[in-house]
Image (spheres, rainbow, N blue to C red):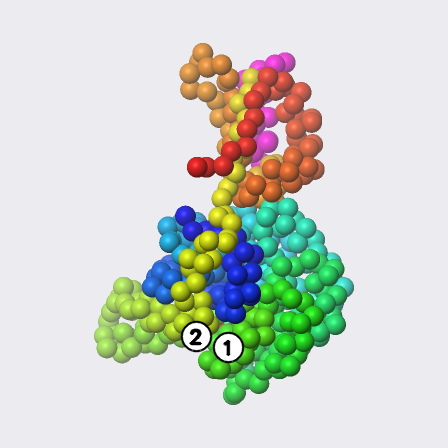
Amino acid sequence: MALVNMRDMLGHAYHNGYAVGGFDLVSLDFLEAIIAAGEAQRAPLILSLAESHFDYYDFELATVAAELAAKRASIPVAIHLDHGASFDSAVKAINLGCNGVMVDASHQAFEDNVALTKKIVSMAHACGVPVEGELGYVAGVEGEDAEKHPGEVIYTSVDEAKTYVEQTGVDLLAVSIGTVHGRMKGEPVLDFERLQKINEALNIPLVIHGGTGLSDQQFHQLIENGVAKINYYTALADAAGNKMRENVSRDDRCGYTGIVDGIQDAMRAEIERCMVNWGSAGQADAVLAVAEAWQPVHHVIIFNVENCDDAQASNMMQQGEKLLSRVPGVRRVLTGNAVQTDAKYKFTWLVEFVHENVIESYRNHPAHVTFADNMFRPVAGDRISIDFRQN
Ligand code: 13P
C-alpha cells in the first residue's frame, strides 16, 4: 500500500532539491510503464489524469486501475486530476480516488481564477486533498505540435502569484515561464529570473507544465529554483507512437497486440531517464518515511427503526445513498439488511470516506445535515456508529 499524501511527497522533493514526475496516462500501457519505471528507479511518482484526455478513455475505469496499481506499488504514488475544469470535476475526481487535484482557471480573469480556486481549495482540504493552482497561461496542447496550437503564453507575475497563493491557499502553483504543452517550436527560452523571484516570494512547491522538449540543464535550473513537480506527457506518447510505426512498418498486417508490442518498454526508458535526471530516482524510501499513507476511513452505522415499516426504511436508505454519495470525499455508500432474522440490529450503513478529514466535513455538509435531521434520526433512534481505519 504505497498510495501517499501528495502534499508530503512534494514537500520532500521541494526541500531536498529534486522533482517528481506527474506523468499523464491515457491507457493501461502508460500506467504499467510509469509504475515499472518508478519501481526500477525507486522513485516517487504521480499518476496524472488530464481532463482534456477524457475523450480517449473512461475516467472512472482509469481511476480504479490507477488506484490498484498505486496500492500494489512498493514506491510512493499519488493520483492527480490534471487540468480540472470545474468545481464539479474536482469533487468527482476526489470521490473516484484522486488524492491531488489541479484547478485550471488560468484562462479566466485573475479575480475569477482566485474565486474558483479558493472554493475548490476549501472543499478539497476538507477531504485532506492538496490542490495545484495555475497562474499565467501555458499555451499548447499535450501530444500535439506547439505551432499548431500556439495560443498566447502569459507569463506568471510575481506579485499576482503572491496574492493568488495568499488568497486561495493552494498547496502548489503551476507557473508559466516559457514552456508550452506539446512538442516545442524551436529552442525553448525560459525566464529563470522570474522563476527565482516567484520561488523566493512563495516558498511552496512549484510545478512546470509542458516538460517535453526541455534540456537536462534546463530541468536542473528549474529544480534549483523551486520546481518540485514536472508534468510530462508528449514525449511518452511520441515514444509509444514511434514504436507502433516501427511495428507496422515491419509487418503491415499486424493486429492490435502486434502494433502495441514493446511500447511499454519504450515509454519506460524515457520515464526512467527523467527520474534519474530530475533526481527523484532513489528517493522512494525517504518519501515513504515522511509521507502520510493515504487511507480511507469507513463510517459504519448499525440500527433499528421505529415508527416506520421495512419498505419505508428501505426507501429512506435508497434516498440516503443517492444524496450522500455526492458529498465531497465520499467514495461510496452501501446500505443493507441483516441476513439473520434474529440479529440484534437489522439495518446498516457503510460510508467510505477518502480521508479522516471527511468525518467532520461530512457531518457538517448540508446534504448530510438535512438527510440526517429529517429522514434518518427521526426513525433510527436505536443505533451504534463507528468510524474505523483499516489495520
Ligand atoms: P507535455 O505534453 O509538453 O510534456 O506537457 C504535459 C503537461 O504539462 C500536462 O499537464
Q: Describe residue 86's horizontal placement relative to residue 263 as left or right.
A: right
Question: Residue 138: x, y in percent?
Answer: 60, 74
* Residue 4 among magenta residues: no
The magenta-colored residue range is 305-322
Label 2 sits on what residue type? Asn
Question: Residue at position x 51%, y 17% from top?
Answer: 345
Q: Nearer the viewer, residue 28 or 221?
A: 221
**Residue 250 place in picture, x, y as percent:** 23, 77
Q: Position of residue 69 (x, y in %)?
A: 39, 53
Residue at 35% from the left image edge and 76% from the top image edge: 242
Q: Position of residue 194 (x, y in %)?
A: 66, 79
Q: Residues within 10 Å of mark 2 (few under 14, many from 20)?
A: some
Q: Disc 2 vs disc 1: Cβ atoms closer than 8 Å?
A: yes
Residue to which mark 1 is pinned: 219
In which quadrant of the rendered view does residue 153 lie? bottom right
Residue where numbered disc 2 is placed? 277
